[in-house]
Amino acid sequence: MPLLAHIPLPAFARLAGEGVPVVAPADWDGPVLRAGLVNTMADGALEATERQFLRLLAAGAPGCGIELHPCELPEIPRGAAARHHCDAHYRSLAELRAVRPEALIVCGANVTDPDLEHLYYREALAEVIAWAEAEVPLTLFSCLATHAVLHFRHGKRRRQLAAKRWGVFPHRVVAPGHRLVAGMADGLVVPHSRWNDVPADDFAAAGLDVLVVDAADGGVHLAATRDGRRAFMQGHPEYDPVSLLKEHKREVGRFVAGARGDYPEAPAGIVDAGGLAKLARYRDEVLAAGRSRAVAPAYPEAAVAPHLHDAWRRDTERFFGAWLAGRE
């Protein structure tokens, strides 16, 4: 359960401040779980992604010390601050392979082009996938990484949705006997943030069990191998409640700057009625400022934050516990 601060990753201090157990390796004499994180998220989400998965690893592996080994793919361009962070704390893929992690998480990235043959870090990601399949006992692929496995290994191409699947949506458990979803019930909610999709039939054709689907459109959130050692997500259950709000803030900023033509409505299901009212008032203020050529008001993140919910956390922690149990 404790996180082992074997490197000076800033996330450890932040999580310790939240009450997550963090200890020095010398102070831990129990079993250790070595986990790799291939973090391909954009600069603004890079460190938040570390924290999100560290929380879930700590919750999902009671009795184990968690030793996280973050890894970057140098093909992904970084700004100065993110480059400094990666240089200071991240391993190369060759170094991660030498660690021989027992569990590996491979993140996605915000790449809207549905054709992964055009993916600018295609070869590096394909190398990660091949290595994980051959040598890592437990793997979890998220979002674009899931699409890449289905494309590169099974010839199943993702398709672009008519509109971005953006928000928190209710889901159904369609394989209740699978160990990864034990204890989960219909109605669980999951955050999504994606333009692309792989249909359930393609997951099944790749030999995967579809476990959880969107209650409205049947889109796959979670699939896995029969033994549960390799799991594939299209949703983002690792997200903090504020993650989608920050995405909305970013998109509103793009609208104000003229980088997009339409005002982005808030992602579905992220706030209660009071939060929706505040976001609606803010939209009216931004549009009024645009009409009068005035400066747009600041995004009301602090005012809306108390209206967020985190209804997916318990099921996500249960899933991580079941996935990590596969190492035993």
Image (tube, rainbow, N blue to C red):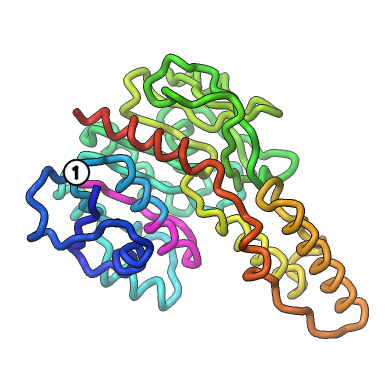
The residue at which mark 1 appears reads as 64
Q: Residue 162: x percent and y percent?
A: 75, 40
In the foreground, 264 or 96 = 264
Asked whether, in this view, residue 48 is left or right of residue 6, the answer is right
Q: Residue furthest right?
A: 291
Residue at the bottom extreme?
294
Magenta range is 34-51
Quarter of the image where the C terminus is located: top left
The amino acid type, in three-letter code, at marker 1 is: Cys
Q: How many marks?
A: 1
Percent coordinates x, y for residue 120 in the rendering? 47, 54
- Residue at image location 65% in from the left, 38% down from the top: 169
Numbered disc 1: secondary structure: loop
Q: In the visual, does 95 lie left or right of 268? A: left
Vertical relation: 146 (above or below) 186: below
Question: Residue 142's quadrant in the figure?
Answer: top left
Image point 35% across, 44% down: which residue?
Answer: 105
Mark 1 Cα shell of 10 Å, populated few (<14), some (14-19), many (≥20): many
Of 32 and 28, which appears nearest the observer? 28
Which residue is at a point 19% across and 41% down the rendered structure image? 63
Residue 275 point in image, percent of width and height: 72, 58
Q: Say if the magenta span includes residue 317.
A: no
Determine the image quadrant of residue 114: top right
Query: Could you tell me which residue is drawn at 50 percent across and 21 percent down?
Result: 210
The spot of residue 229 in percent (x, y) is 31, 28
The image quarter in which residue 7 lies: bottom left
Q: Is residue 146 left or right of residue 194?
A: left
Above or below, 218 relative to 280: above
